[in-house]
Structure formats: structure tokens, C-alpha cells
Amino acid sequence: MQHYLWPYNLGTNSVFAFFSITLMIIFCSVLINLGLALQQNMLKASGYSYDQKIILNKLDNITQILIQESSRKMLTPRMVDNLKNDIQENVSLLKKHQIEIKKLLEGNNIIEKKSLDYFYSYSIKKQVDDLNPYLEKINKRSQYIIHANFASLTSGYNFWTPIDSLSNEDSKLLIIISDLNQSIHQAALNQNKLLKILYAILLLLALIGLWSIWFFKINRLNKALEKSYLNLSQKNETLSFQASHDSLTLLPNRFAFNKRLHDLIDENIDENNKALNFSLILLDIDYFKSINDTLGHQTGDALLSEVAQRLMKVINSLRTSTTIYRLGGDEFAIILENIKNKLEVQRYSEDLMNELHKTFTYENHTLSISCSMGIVFNPPRPINSHEAFSAADIALYRVKENGRGHFLFYDDISLVPVRELLKTENELRAAVNNQDFLVYYQPIINLQTKHIDYIEALARWNHPQLGIIPPSQWLAIAERLSLVSLSTLQVLNKADSDYQTWLAQGLQLKRININFTEALLVNQQALQELNIFSNQRPWMGIEVTESIILDRSFSTIKKHLCHLKKQGVEIFLDDFGTGFANLSHLRELPVDTIKIDRSFTAELLDNKEAQVIVKFIIDLANRLNKKTVCEGVENTETLDLLMKMGCNYSQGFLHSEPLSFQNMTNLLKRDRNL
């Protein structure tokens, strides 16, 4: 019986051993596959965690731009909007990565979940949970920033302290993210060690199987780790590049521009006698917003890329060291270094103009494009980077005022040192904040009744040292600084208060006319406030100049004027006859009254052609059921002639110069025989 039992027992043991080894191999294989899945989760989680750290650093960089006074002063509302959008996108990405990390740590099934909980996930999950409140804080703060206005966003350190304290390198949030990244990375390394032990066990059980598994698994895993670390390194380099370059054009961005301009000027600011030998060019694409609005952002992006390529083409032909930057939107900056000849800068600028003025074709759309440039060349010492930038920006704004499509040097348009202009800018900002504007009034006389029907409200800056300053000396600066809407609202409020006082004294008026600029008529936020204001102020009339017809946003302006007209606002077309409008525009615009420019009135007595033109305008207005006002009337002979021509109203020094509130009150009382 033993003869039969031994082979049986041996066979049973062999089968049992083989079965046991097989089960152990299968079990180890299952553990390996599980470990690989967990390892992959940890690698992904590590990548997301590392991205969170980079994103937080990027948020800190953006916050520092808005906190630091030197960079904040150069920001326009459009730049601030771009930075605000960057903050929103990065905070959203930060939260998205947090969700992905949490999913990875929970596993894809119950086995992975239990394994993660057993080995190492508890401490990591606790770190993730610790991180959530801080991410919620930074998310709430970003929502607050999204709805903040321009003044709040550029108010400096106090406004940005909450998000700065969350994103800077010493913040609790960054410490937790760094610890989490280290923990996940360590967990991945521990998982790798565990896998090596399992492979050693398999080596004892089945060398051939183990070597096969090692060859196909561990080797692949090591490569995955190397590839992961390589990808992380490359991602770090990519993020570093993205932090200093524009993603669309691949040109250096505003951050890189500010740094280079600072290094070029501010680092050498003590060398007063040393020439800077550089030129700064600020360049805008003319009417880019209209292209974006009418043809779409895809066309706009294609145009920006084309402009960048054309700029690089011109740069490559230069011998001097030159760098192009995209500051945001359609704004570009060019720094030419080691250049001593202004004529060379002028030739270079002409080459840029010629290259950019070539037509641009995209998806069956052929566009005639142009650009405007403001240039500062070898600014005199002492000067800092902010002042140099402002000088070029002032020159650029003057180009836009004068029709766009050309370039100007700052020293060709102003003999005033840029530091003095910046002082004026700061004083004007303070004047708006302190409401240092006065309202003067000039009467508009009804030529039939000889009484005052309308008065025009004229803003005056009450400067603490220089006294009363007319708009001709500060309005252009206010428009460049986007302060016109605020100053106009102050004029409206003062005029409303004065009107109520006159009304209480029995001094009735048809309208008080307020001057509206083109910039104000396309400012959506300001127009919303004005719509609310005009609904409750039946006395309100507005005056717009003929130059609005040249604005690319004419259709938008026309729509807003029509809306104001429906609300009962009376609209005056100012400076008519200076050359911009034609009969078609006169028919399209919802104006009630045409104000004939003073240039015709001044020559009316001596110039027959002026008489013919004025008579034609008056007759045309009458046929169109519109009233006419002649500006600049200074003598009775001119007034008599205008009355014979059928003009409805007269305005000028013959009747009165612009008057203060009290003097205007006295004039109204005399006019009303009170």
C-alpha cells in the first residue's frame, strides 16, 4: 500500500506546492498590478501638487505687480482686466488640481481604496483636508477681485494683502502644498520599495516568471519614474518661460519688459552724467478693438501673431540690440539699446510703419491695418523707468489724438520735463478724488425772446496753487488717465444742485448742457450711471462734438445717444462745420440742435463764403426740424446778421463770458426781471 501511497503523496505535494506557488505568483502579480496602479495615482497626484505650487508662485508674481507702486502706476484698466482674468483662471486651475488629487487618493475601486487607506493615505488625506479651507479662502478672494472696480484693484497693498498673504512664499498655504507634494512624492518612493520586495519574493518562487515580470514591469516603472521627473523638470522650465513670455506671440511679456527697463534705467540711476543710449517705443494697433468686435477674437489673435512676426522681421535687419515685448491686448513695446542717433530710431520707426501698414488677410477677410507709436529717445538724466514709460505713453496718446497711423517723439511734442507732467497727472488724480472741480456757466440766448433758455456747464479745475484751470490744459490728460467719466459725474451732480437752487428761486431753464466726450460715450459703466441720472433729471442736455463721427465705435455711440434721446435728454451737436460730418451723418444722429462752430462766426461779417455756409446750415437745420446755435458771437453786428439768417440761439462773449454759480444766478435774475 505504501508503494502506491508514496507517489500519490509526492504528486499531491507537488501539485500543492505548484498550486501554492502559482497562487503566490498570482497574488504577487495582483499586488504588483495594484501597486503599479497606486504608483501611477501617486505620480499623477505629485504632478498636480507640484503644479499647485507653481500656480501659487504665479499668483504671487501677479499680486506683486499690482502691489508694487512702480509697476502699478503703469497699469491701464485693460491691463488690470487681463491680470484679473489671469488670477481667476489660476485660482480655478488650483481648485481643479485639488479635486483631481482627492480623486487619485480615493482610488478607482474598493481594493485600491482599502490599500491606499492601509499603506499611507491617511496622513496625505489629512494634508489635503487641511489645504481645502485655504483654497476656499483664495477662491472667495478671487471672486471678490473679479467684481472689484479699477480704482480698488490699483489701490495697492491694503487691497491685495489678503491674497498676497495666501500666495506669498511664507504663507501657510504654500507650506501645506509643499508638505503635501513632499508626502506624495515620498509615498511614491515607498510604493516603489514595496514593489521591489514583491519582485524579490517572486524571484524565489519562480525565477523565470519573476525575471519576466521584472523585465516588463519594473523596468517600465523605472522609465516611467525617469520620464515623470524629466517631465516635471521640463514643465518647470516651461512655466518659467510662460511667466516671462506671452503665450500667443511667444514674445517677452510685461513682466520681462518691466524688469529689463528697470535694469536699464533704475540700476544706473546714480550715473547722472552717463548717457542711457537707448530708445523706448510703445506701439498700439489702430482700432484693434473694432476688429475684435466685428470679426471675432480668433481674427484678432491671428492679427496679433502676424504683427509680432512683422516686428521680428524688421528687428532681424537691425544691428543694434533690440527686444520686442507684448504688454497685453494690442500693446507692444520695443527697447533699442546702444543706439546714439535719433535719425536711426526714426528710420527704424518708419520701417515698422511700412511693414505694419501692409494689408492683412485671414479667412477671406482682407484688412488695411495701421499702428500708432510713441517714442522716447535718450531721455535726459535724472529719469526713472516709470517716467520713461510715461513719456512714451504720452507721445502715443498724442498720436491717437491727432488721427493715429504715425509716430511722435516725446521731445518733439513737449518741452515740459516728463517729471512735471507726471506731477500734473498725480495732481489731477487727486483733484478727481477730492472733487476739486468747479462748474462755470455760459448762457445761450433765444434770439426771438432775447432771454436765456439754455446754459452750458463748463468744468474748471480749481488747482490749489495755480487757481482756475480751463479744460484745454487738462482734459486730454484726464482722457488718457480714464478720469473723464468721474469728472463728468461730478459736474453733473454740481449742476443738479445748482439747478435745484435756481428752481427754488423761480429761475426756470429749459436745459443745462453737459459736454460728453467720445471716451465717455463708449464707457459702459459710466453710461449706466448716466442713464440712471438722466431718468431723474429732466433739465439735462448733452453736447457732443462732431469728431465722434470719426470714431470706429460710431455705431455704439449712436445707439447710446438714441437711448438717451428716448429718455428725454436733449442732444446738441457741437462744433458743427469743422469738416468731419456730412449730410448723411446729420440725418443719422439723433440731435435736436446744431451748434455752428465759432470759426464761421468770427469771419461772418467779412467773409461772403462764411455767410453762405452759415445760411445753408441754418436753412438745412430748419428743414430737418432742428434748432441752431451760433457760437462765438462777440458783437451786435454779427448778432443782427444771424437773426436775419433765421438762427435760433446765440452764445458768446457778447452776452456773457463763462460765470460762476453766483454770477450766473445774478444774470438769470436780471434776465427774468427778478
Image: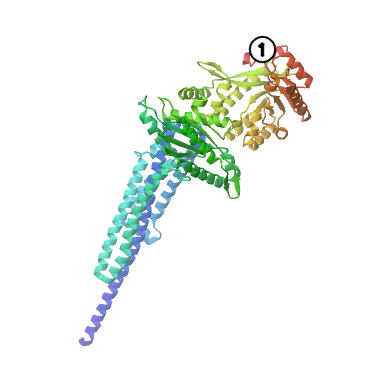
Horizontal and vertical percent position of residue 665: 66, 14
Residue in view at x 59 percent, y 40 percent = 290
Horizontal and vertical percent position of residue 137: 43, 41
Depth check: give the residue in front, 441 or 629. Answer: 629
Q: Amino acid at mark 1?
A: Asn
The quadrant in which the N terminus is found is bottom left
Q: Decide if residue 303 is on the left or right side of residue 558.
A: left
Q: Where, by quadrant of the figure, is residue 113 drawn?
A: bottom left
Q: Is residue 631 above or below residue 56?
A: above
Q: Where, by quadrant of the figure, is residue 43 drawn?
A: bottom left
Horizontal and vertical percent position of residue 503: 68, 19
Q: Decide if residue 220 is on the left or right side of residue 512.
A: left
Horizontal and vertical percent position of residue 184: 33, 52
Q: How many marks?
A: 1
Depth check: give the residue in front, 365 or 489. Answer: 365
Residue 75 in view, yes or no: no
How crowded pointer 1 is (Cα within 10 Å; few <14, some 14-19, many 20+) is rated as few
Callout 1: helix, strand or loop? Answer: helix
User: Coloring scheme of the render?
Assistant: rainbow
The quadrant in which the C terminus is found is top right
Q: Decide if residue 350 is on the left or right side of residue 618.
A: left
| Residue under pointer 1 | 666
- Residue most toward the left? 2
Residue 378 in view, yes or no: yes
